[in-house]
Amino acid sequence: MKARHPHDHADIPQRNDELAGFSLVELMLSLSLVVVTLILLQSTLFSAIKNRVATAEQDQRNAMAYDLIQRLTAIPFGKQGDPAATGAQLSELFDDDQDLGTVNLKNLQTAPATPGHSFTTNLDGVTTAWRISVTSDLDGDGLTTSFREGRPDLLQIEIYAQGRLMFRTARAAEYTNTRKD
């Protein structure tokens, strides 16, 4: 029997190169799969961020619309023949303090099928185009021929933000100035 040298590796099984490790094709497929997955995750993340920003902006518009409808229901109704609101009265009503000024709802009334009063706000970087419509057209058809329309004691209030209807409500004059049906 032949003496073995300590560095002789004859009894260690030899590696079969065909079965060992990953081939270049397998490595490229794996890396391609990882890249596609990362791109999809990035797209999903950007979409989620965009939707979060849009939702936050809409929440801010909802809060502002609620504030506007509260203002329009808090001011006096007014009476037939009250003059149209001035620019200063509109600014005082729609500014960001709690002083509503001297305007009443009849001052804000416009003819049916007219756009009403428009203004723009910019709060926390969110710019919003608002439109406030106060009219005696209660069904929104541009006419005042239906039941209860055209009366001096009933008005419809609509608030739009970015062209989207946010609130619609009707308001009657104070009881002493309301006509019975």
Image: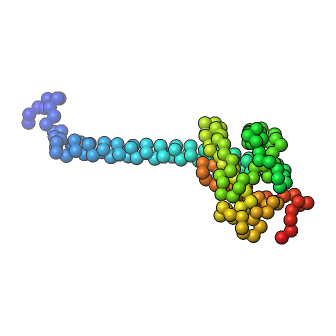
**Camera-nearest residue between 47 and 85:** 85
Above or below, 175 against 18 in this view is below
Task: Identify the residue at horizontal 74%, vertical 47% (top origin).
Answer: 67
The colour scheme used here is rainbow
Direction left: furthest residue: 1
Residue 72 in the image, given as x and y percentages of width and height: 77, 50
**Camera-nearest residue between 43 and 17:** 43
Task: Identify the residue at horizontal 66%, vertical 61% (top origin).
Answer: 142
- 13 sits to left or right of 103: left
Residue 134 in the image, given as x and y percentages of width and height: 73, 54
**Camera-nearest residue between 14 and 113:** 113
- The answer to whether any part of residue 115 appears in the image is yes
Would you identify the image quadrant in which residue 89 lies? top right
Would you identify the image quadrant in which residue 137 lies? bottom right
Residue 57 in the image, given as x and y percentages of width and height: 60, 44
Direction right: furthest residue: 176
- Where does the N terminus fall, quadrant-wise? top left
- 119 sits to left or right of 43: right
Task: Identify the residue at horizontal 82%, vertical 50% (top origin).
Answer: 82
Residue 75 in the image, given as x and y percentages of width and height: 82, 49
Would you identify the image quadrant in which residue 180 lies? bottom right
Task: Identify the residue at horizontal 86%, vertical 65% (top origin).
Answer: 179
- The answer to whether any part of residue 56 appears in the image is no
- Where does the C terminus fall, quadrant-wise? bottom right
Number of callouts in the render? 0
